[in-house]
Amino acid sequence: MNFQLPIPILGFAAYSGTGKTTLLEVLLPKLTEAGLRIGMLKHAHHNFDVDKEGKDSYRLRKAGASQMLISSRNRFALMTETPEAESEFEYLLTRFDTDKLDVILVEGCKNIAFPKIELHREVVGKPWLYPSDDNIIAIAADTEVTDSELPQMNINDLDAISAFVVDYVNRQANPVVTKSEGACCDTLSPAFLSVTQGQEKILSMVNRVEGTEACAMFDASGRVLSDDVISPVNVPQYTNSAMDGYAIRGEDIGLAEYQVVGEVMAGYAHNAPLLAGQAVKIMTGAPTPVGVDTVIMREQSSQQGDIVTFNAEIKVGQNVRQAGEDLAIGAAVFSQGQRLASPEMGMLASLGFGECTVFRKLKVAVFSTGDEVQAPGTEQKENSIYDSNRFTIMGMLQALGCEILDYGIIEDNEDLMIQALEEASQNADVVMTSGGVSVGDADYIKLALDKLGQIDFWRINMRPGRPLAFGQINNKPFFGLPGNPVAVMVSFINFVEPALRKMQGEVDWQPLKVNAVATENLRSRQGRTEFSRGVYELDSRGQLTVRTTGKQGSGILRSMSEANCLIEISPSVDTVKVGESVTIIPLQGRI
Ligand code: AMP
Ligand code: MG
């Protein structure tokens, strides 16, 4: 689980028909007798209701109370309507008053990752959970299993189950620190971090670049504005026709016919004011003559000689765009930190800007490491692999509009590494390498980084991409990405891109995340975030669905090429079943 619950939690996992509730009903008295104060969380599949029709609380809920707290001498109940979706497991746990409890027992929630006792009865005829579920910590069954080291109890031996639960609660509440755990102050021991913790740490340690420059509009795509933009003009500049047709004065509406006294094309004007009963033929975008406020489209008009008649109802002001209607002089257009894409380019141009002021480009130094890594474009040597990481990294840097300093592949030699890292940190705003940062690796890059200091070697609870080095070299942020090609990209997407965007001056950037329905079972593991490569699409019913690209090895770069999203399975979930909703991160424009 992602958060720290102050008291132990223990689940009872079983297929329906095993008799979970019946067992708990006789187990709870034994546990309370042993002194445990118990909170229960039970998942109900159906549309349950604790309230009774006609009761005051029921009537008030139906009348619109989305939360209803009812209290009496003996108990209170808070009923919360969740019409959108069932609440998250972790959120539900926070509803308990843990000061008044010793343990939370959970019935159901088989697919959510937290410690559980598996209940099993042969007659139910269902498969075992423990072989594929790391969360099972003990088995209570009516038969013995021989292929597991887990503690086993007879499902009918309530005293044994009760003793197990009491012991579990005591152990969780008073953990015994073993010697090896106690000796954790070794400075080299890598920190374990969640994805969010890693992201937050990195973001808190990088700052926006100093320095701005003027940029011609035709070069501005992808750049980040360093100033707010105020409109210097009215858009549109003058009141004009939104249609090809005839322009008349609003007060003349209702006449049988009008005299056409002229024609205005876009870019020209009809300078004489119109008189009563007159019309001008007008083209889309042409300025309306003085006194004219209404345009009738050509399709609703018929002109004979210089007389025009209209065959539709006419409203004052129709088909006319007012000066300043889209944007008035002095109105705020964009704020500092806005990244410019085509709509922003077009808008700035429409306001007459030939250039804009942007933050200077971010310079990023990149190199690869590893004796086995060989540059592409040369004949393949024995025992070597071509360097792909530098190219995926450079591609992603280009998409972000960075200036790239390519240092190639640095030979495995500590002095050369230190020299390269030093030089890169002098010339660039950010330094990035791939490979050689996993725990236990004896790569030279690690030795070099250790000497340069201020680098932390993290283990992120994610897959792929567990190892990550991050720190500063000469006050410049340094990213030591993992070596595996998919891990490199997934780490870049999660940790590097948000940091670079902040350094580029972009404000409040958030990656797009949406939910899609899984069309295949997805497995993960408790406590870590799983990023599978996915393909999302709309199915024939218009529902967003997602499947994986197949094999998910962290070296299979093709999976990134086939994917259009990452599927993000959070640490608290260990299985997503077909038909369940899962978070996806679309990748268009990012890789
Ligand atoms: P490492 O973290 O250095 O043990 O690398 C993990 C895996 O990634 C190894 O199989 C390396 O050969 C591979 N790898 C490291 N650097 C690169 C690179 N630049 N391009 C492609 N694969 C690499
Ligand atoms: Mg290596």
Image (cartoon, rainbow, N blue to C red):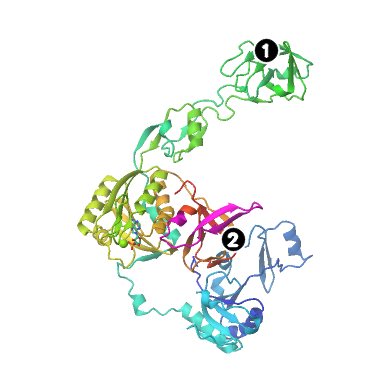
Q: Residues within 10 Å of mark 2 (few under 14, many from 20)?
A: some
Question: Residue 109 appears in which quarter of the rendering?
Answer: bottom right
Q: Residues within 10 Å of mark 1 (few under 14, many from 20)?
A: some
Disc 2 or disc 1, which is closer to the eye?
A: 2
Question: Is disc 2's CB within 8 Å of ligand 1?
Answer: no
Query: What label sits on residue 285 in the rendered view?
Result: none
User: What are the residue bounds of the magenta stretch?
Assistant: 532-560
Q: Position of residue 409 (x, y in %)?
A: 28, 53
Q: Which residue is mark 2?
A: 519
Q: Position of residue 582 (x, y in %)?
A: 56, 59
Q: Is residue 312 visible?
A: yes
Q: Position of residue 271 (x, y in %)?
A: 61, 11
Labels 2 and 1 touching (C-beta < 8 A): no
State whether residue 126 is above or below residue 83: below
- Looking at the image, which is closer to me, 161 or 99? 161
The answer to whether 386 appears left or right of 17 in the picture is left
Question: Which of pointers 2 and 1 lies earlier in the amino acid sequence?
Answer: 1
Residue drawn at the location 42% of the way across and 44% of the way down:
399
- Looking at the image, which is closer to me, 222 or 70? 222
Question: Residue 11 appears in which quarter of the rendering?
Answer: bottom right
Q: Which residue is mark 1?
A: 274
Q: Is residue 40 magenta?
A: no
Q: Amino acid at mark 2?
A: Thr
Residue drawn at the location 48% of the way across and 29% of the way down:
349
Circle 2 SS class: loop
Q: Is residue 534 magenta?
A: yes
- Looking at the image, which is closer to me, 425 or 408? 408
Marks 2/1: CA–CA distance: 66 Å
